[in-house]
Amino acid sequence: MRRSGPLGHLAAYGTLQFPEILRALLGRVPDLEPGTIVDHEARRLPGVGFPGLVAAPGSLAPAHVIVDLSEQEWEALDAYEDDFYALVDVVVLIDGGLEVPAVAYRVPASMATSTIWTADWFATEHLETFLGAISD
């Protein structure tokens, strides 16, 4: 769900980290800067392959920062994300601990399981099927 006002950088912690998915959604792959979202975890959601970001003080969620999204691309990403996601302000640590303000799509903690979601797990178990579903 889109919030009002300028958004700046997107912290992509789940499926939006994958160049193939970004290409399918945006028609291009924006620059991706690896980092970690401070005080959050990416957790599995019940019954689906994609994750939910939840607040978790002291934890770090692997992510990529996307800095160059156009207004139309933000709209495409908002349409892609389910309504239960809310855009929230986060801090991402990149290159040697540099803190970058960003926004991320987060879910209520009650929606997530206690199992950490990983990009490797998704790539092995769900990426091919997921790509087929969003490319149709």
Image (tube, grey):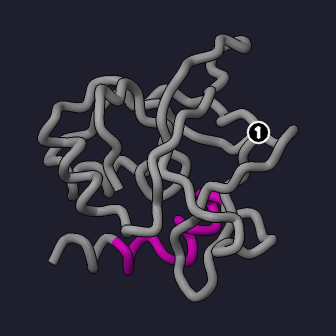
Check if residue 103 falls in the magenta segment: no
Q: Main secondary structure of the magenta part?
A: helix
31 relative to 82, above or below: above
Residue at horizontal 49 percent and vertical 28 percent from the top: 102
In this view, 35 is above or below 61: above
Residue 71 is drawn in which quadrant? top left
| Magenta stretch in the rendered image | 118-130
- Residue 56 at x, y percent in the picture: 80, 49
Most foreground residue, 133 or 45: 45
Residue nearest the observer in this picture, 39 or 35 = 39
Please, is residue 54 above or below residue 117 in the view?
A: above
The residue carrying mark 1 is 39
Question: Where residue 69 appears, x then y in whole percent?
Answer: 25, 31
Q: Residue at x 32, y 57 (%)?
A: 21
Residue that protrudes farthest toward the bottom in the picture: 47
In the image, is 91 to the left or to the right of 55? left
Residue 4 located left or right of residue 123: left
Identify residue type, mark 1.
Answer: Asp
Please name whichever residue, 74 or 108, is drawn nearer the observer in this view of the structure: 108
Up-down: is 116 above or below 74?
below
